[in-house]
Image (spheres, rainbow, N blue to C red):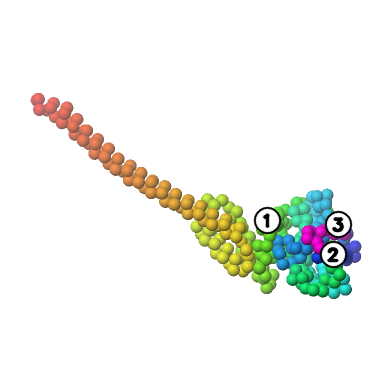
Amino acid sequence: MGTELKKSFSWEIDNFSDINKVIRSGLYSSGGGCQWFLQLYPKGYGVSDHVSLALSAYKPESLRLGWKRKINLFFVFLNQSGKELCRSNDECRDLLFCAEVPRWIFLRTLPLTKLQQKGFLKNNKLTIKFNIEVTKVVHQGKSTKNDIFEFNGVHILVSQAVSKAKICRNHPGFFNDFYPKTKEVNAVYFTLFFSLIETLSKSPRSLSVTELRNAQNQLTVLTKAGFKLDFLKSKLNKASSGCQVQNLLGEQIKNVKLTLSKEKIKYAAAAKVSSFGFIGFFFKKFFLPCFSSV
């Protein structure tokens, strides 16, 4: 790996505590034909107890079809004295960037409780030092939508990344109180979460009682683990109500069919008796007199 694909950068932010909205750094080039920029969310992105940090590819739409980069990212937050405040973890390694995933967001970096401590951030200045090491470069190739990458410990298709990220954006803070002890535990719970999302994305009419029961169990487990899923709870209740109505209608239709079937049998039996009676009347009225006159 050439040294041009591994570089260090620094981003200095003055008056940090006065910033209430997302801010963006300048452009950085790590080689490999791609530029990068950082975005800092001082009040968190999808969480409310940490500063969030994002790394994005610059103008990804200008790159060729099938482009991709794999990088290792390391960053550290420093105060003006150079004291380390926090640093990245293993989740910042082997990151895939492509047309479908041009940005990665690291939700929990610097705890806001630390920033609120007196004297923690000297002179209200924050410095972010980071290294970008590009480990794979593909300038052009096949579409990357069927590539597989890791999202919150779960291996998914790249094409699913947008929908998963949209959930985080539309429902910020839904896992604020979820603190898994290991990456494996995180993967287990997010696998359950994505399974629940997939179930509830179906039409309520297509859901079976078993699927709804499993969804309820998954919701219970996730809620106990710290997930705030009121937006899914209301959806599940609605789907369950729809299923109950559907089952009730099904029973009513079944009863109506059964009643009609019984009435049909009675009608057929009555019609049969009636026809025999008519034959008997015809025989007595017209046939027997012929013999009696002989």
Q: Give left or right: position of 42 versus 182.
A: right
**Real-space CA distance between mark 1 and mark 3, rounded to the nearest whole angstrom:** 28 Å
Q: Is residue 184 left or right of residue 33?
A: left
What residue is drawn where x is 54% and y is 57%?
Answer: 237
Instruction: Tell me which segment is drawn in magenta.
Output: 18-28
In this view, the mark in front (1 or 2)? 2
Element carrying mark 3: strand
Which image quarter holds the N terminus?
A: bottom right
Q: Is residue 229 magenta?
A: no
Q: Residue 195: image x %, image y %?
A: 61, 60
Disc 3 marks which residue?
A: 35
- Residue 22 in magenta stretch: yes
Q: How many marks?
A: 3
Residue identified by numbered label 2 = 15
**Which quadrant of the structure image shows residue 57?**
bottom right
Q: Is residue 269 left or right of residue 51?
A: left
Q: Amino acid at mark 3?
A: Gln
**Mark 2 neighbour class, 10 Å CA radius: few under 14, some 14 to 19, many 20 or more:** few
The residue that mark 1 highlights is 170
- Give the mark nearer the N terminus: 1 vs 3: 3
Q: Nearer the viewer, mark 2 or mark 3?
A: 2
Give me the C-alpha separation between circle 2 and circle 3: 27 Å
Task: Tell me the number on the disc at residue 239.
Answer: none
Front residue (pair 188, 84): 84
Q: Is residue 91 above or below residue 254?
A: below
Q: Is residue 135 visible?
A: no
Task: Please state which amino acid type lies under the numbered disc 1.
Answer: Asn
